[in-house]
Amino acid sequence: MAQFDIHANPGKLRQFIPFVVVIQSAAFDHSDRRVVAPLIHAKDFGRVFSKRFNPTFIIDGAPVVLQPLEIVSIPKTLLGAPLATLKHEGQAIVDALDELTSQAYG
């Protein structure tokens, strides 16, 4: 499981959050956990703060929105095999994380 791999959400809210994307660097592959961000169905997302902070991706033909405010760490054993990758969208994900941690907003 690599950075930006998409996995089925192993949590209880899969109806609204069908997927999670691994965001941690390969430098931490030795860990038994993975830091993931939810990919929420666009129809269930509500207000998008900004396209940079909440980028939209198409997974299995449906739009999903990255929600950096709900980043979690979960045991890698819960993730299963990757379903796809967002490696080609990696910069958009990194940009969203930069927005989350930016000091520009005070």
Image (cartoon, rainbow, N blue to C red):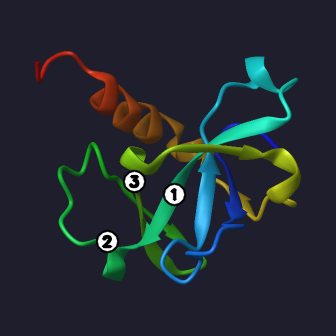
Look at label 1 and name its amino acid: Pro
Residue placed at 28% from the left, 44% from the top? 53
Residue sitting nearer the eye, 65 or 72: 72
Instruction: Report how far apart the C-alphas of labels 3 and 1 lie in the structure.
Output: 6 Å
Look at label 3 and name its amino acid: Gln
Marks 3 and 1 in Cβ contact (< 8 Å): yes
Instruction: Specify few, some or many for label 3: CA neighbours under 10 Å numbering under 14, 14-19, or 20 or more.
Output: many
Left or right, 17 with reference to 33? left
Quarter of the rendering occupied by the C terminus: top left
Tell me where residue 13 sits by quadrant.
bottom right
Instruction: Report how far apart the C-alphas of labels 2 and 3 lie in the structure.
Output: 9 Å
Residue sitting nearer the eye, 26 or 68: 68
Left or right, 79 with reference to 100? right
Residue sitting nearer the eye, 68 or 96: 68
Residue 45 disc label: 2
N-term-proximal mark, 1 vs 2: 1
**Relative to 47, is 26 above or below?**
above
Where disc 2 sits, the SS reads: helix
Marks 2 and 3 in Cβ contact (< 8 Å): yes
Tell me where residue 6 sits by quadrant.
bottom right
Residue placed at 33% from the left, 82% from the top? 43
Look at label 2 and name its amino acid: Phe
Residue 63: % across, % down: 43, 74
Where disc 3 sits, the SS reads: loop
Residue labelled with disc 1: 38
Residue labelled with disc 3: 67
Residue sitting nearer the eye, 50 or 9: 9
N-term-proximal mark, 2 vs 3: 2
Instruction: Report how far apart the C-alphas of labels 1 and 2 lie in the structure.
Output: 11 Å
